[in-house]
Image (cartoon, rainbow, N blue to C red):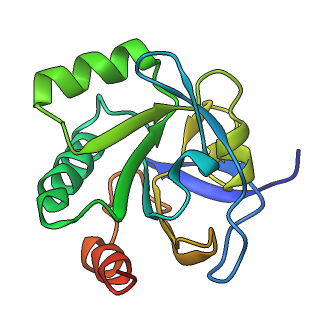
Amino acid sequence: MVARSGMIIGSREFPVVAKMLKVGDQAPDFALTANNWSRKTLSDYTGKVKILSIVPSLDTSVCSAQTRRFNQEASAFNQDIVILTVSADLPYAQSRWCGAEGIERVETLSDHKDMNFSTAYGVHVIDLRICQRAAFVIGQNDIVQYSEYVPNIDHVINFEAVLSCAMSMI
């Protein structure tokens, strides 16, 4: 597996899968595990604008805040926009966390089983088997409209840019 410099944790840098998605790319299909252990694929969200919020783990402060912020922002969206938070956390942990935090508007999906999503989307932190923080907006036609990779685990995504991009498509 080819890797690039990628995610910084403290003073250490960890390699991430080399492929990075760019605006205009076809979004790779995926099969992720929902909290009820069902499989979700890109085609399950056909016709919707998809905000993909990728986090290393919901049990960390920045990832937790990122997901809570998207849950709050989702109240302004209609049914044409879906927000998916993806991590390598087990579905049990995602479900527990969502229940404790009152997350109802964001769908959490796990890549724990095989990390295929993380590899296809260029967020697989190989040595740690977690996801690099990132955000994507994918249009109704499954073309990437926004792509952001955050190199430092402690830094946040550009919420305004993500939300503006998604809102411009409905």
Q: Where is residue 40 in the image (x, y as percent from the top left)?
A: 57, 35
**Residue 125, above or below 137:** above
Q: Position of residue 116 (x, y in %)?
A: 73, 38
Q: Can residue 55 be seen in this view?
A: no
Q: Residue furthest top?
A: 92
Say how many tags the image has. 0
Location of the C terminus by quadrant is bottom left
* Residue shown at 74% from the left, 51% from the top: 120
**Residue 80, above or below 32:** below
* Residue shown at 62% from the left, 82% from the top: 23
Location of the N terminus by quadrant is top right
* Residue shown at 22% from the left, 27% from the top: 98
Foreground residue among 149 and 121: 121
Question: With 121 as the anchor, is 150 left or right in this view?
Answer: left
**Residue 22, above or below 72:** below
Q: Can residue 141 be seen in this view?
A: yes
Q: Position of residue 62 (x, y in %)?
A: 26, 47
Foreground residue among 134 and 16: 134
User: Dividing the picture into quarters, in which one does residue 135 lie?
Assistant: bottom left
Q: Which residue lies furthest to the right in this view?
A: 1
Question: With 108 as the anchor, is 59 left or right in this view?
Answer: left
* Residue shown at 51% from the left, 64% from the top: 47
Question: With 89 as the anchor, is 126 left or right in this view?
Answer: right
**Residue 46, above or below 116:** below
Foreground residue among 127 and 91: 91
